[in-house]
Amino acid sequence: MSDIEPFSAEEIERYARHIVLPEIGGPGQQALKRARVLVIGAGGLGAPVLAYLAAAGVGTLGIADDDGVSLSNLQRQVIHDTGTIGQSKTESAARAIARLNPHVICRRYDERLEDGNIDAVLKGFDLLIDGSDNFDTRYRAADAAERAEIPLVTGAVGRFDGSLTVLKPYETGKDRTLNPRYRDLYPKMPPAGLVPSCAEAGVIGPVTGVIGTLMAMEAVKLITGAGEPLIGRLLLYDGLGARFETIYYARKQPQ
């Protein structure tokens, strides 16, 4: 990995509130600057993820989304605005990031990630964040991250609630057993049409901000080494009840 140039005076001021944190400091901020993060989806979850990681100083952000900005997106996808309706979401998000932090490099992928291209797109990134809204992509992202041996932060929302977890199934945990896979948490993909989409069931805008912001926090922890990531833990948020719960899960042993 190539050396990163020292921070400029402007960068030191920009990231001052991080640098004074003992858990982050200068080394952690340099790690953020070196980081290359691919975000799947520039929608409800991807919007806060991209905004907070850009603000945090992640050096390279990949944005993968094949959709365009529509008026109905703006109730929750806060990285876009009325003036970007009709633009591709990757273009709209990249322009917003450039306004927020010109030090961030954006790589745009205006395509749906399929079996034939996801490995090639993922190459060169060291962290994957899945903010997609369909199960096909979630399972595909989990498999690709495991093959590439990079961490995956994955989240989902519906109506007034959401969830997120972190996956590193290629490593062992404190008990010296392999960390769980995505399929240890969700063994089978639900049949098509069983789980309604946000367009069908609705979703309250702020819940995407809650879960997306927590996903960004997990990414910062993974990059800097601060804290304990949500590996083997599924964090659940109930917006109407204002409750968080944690479910523990483990690697299933072969029968």
Image: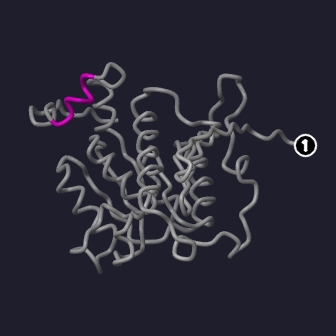
Q: Quadrant of the N terminus?
A: top left
The percent coordinates of residue 84 (x first, y second) are 25, 74
The percent coordinates of residue 111 (x first, y second) are 43, 72
Q: What main secondary structure does the magenta stretch of the protein show? A: helix
Q: Please tell me whether residue 245 is drawn above or below residue 99 in the rendered image.
A: above
Left or right placement of residue 56 versus residue 178 in this view: left
Q: How many marks?
A: 1
Mark 1 closeness class: few <14, some 14–19, many ≥20 residues within 10 Å? few
Q: Quadrant of the C terminus?
A: top right
Q: Please tell me whether residue 86 is drawn above or below residue 237 in the rendered image.
A: below
Q: Residue furthest left?
A: 9
Q: Residue at x 23, y 60 (%)?
A: 96
Colour mode of the rendering: one colour
Q: Residue at x 41, y 75 (%)?
A: 67
Q: Residue furthest right?
A: 255
Q: Which residues are magenta?
A: 14-20
Q: Please tell me whether residue 240 is drawn above or below residue 232 in the rendered image.
A: below
Q: Please tell me whether residue 38 is drawn above or below residue 41 in the rendered image.
A: above
Q: Quadrant of residue 121?
A: bottom left
Between residues 116 and 88, which one lies in front from this camera angle? 88
The amino acid at mark 1 is Gln
Q: Residue at x 24, y 49 (%)?
A: 104
The percent coordinates of residue 208 (x first, y second) are 45, 57
Instruction: Indicate whether residue 207 is drawn in magenta.
Output: no
As helix, strand or loop, the secondary structure at mark 1 comes to loop
Residue bearing mark 1? 255
Q: Residue furthest top?
A: 22
The percent coordinates of residue 154 (x first, y second) are 54, 50
Left or right placement of residue 27 versus residue 212 in this view: left
Between residues 252 and 160, which one lies in front from this camera angle? 160
Q: Residue at x 36, y 22 (%)?
A: 23
Q: Residue furthest bottom?
A: 86
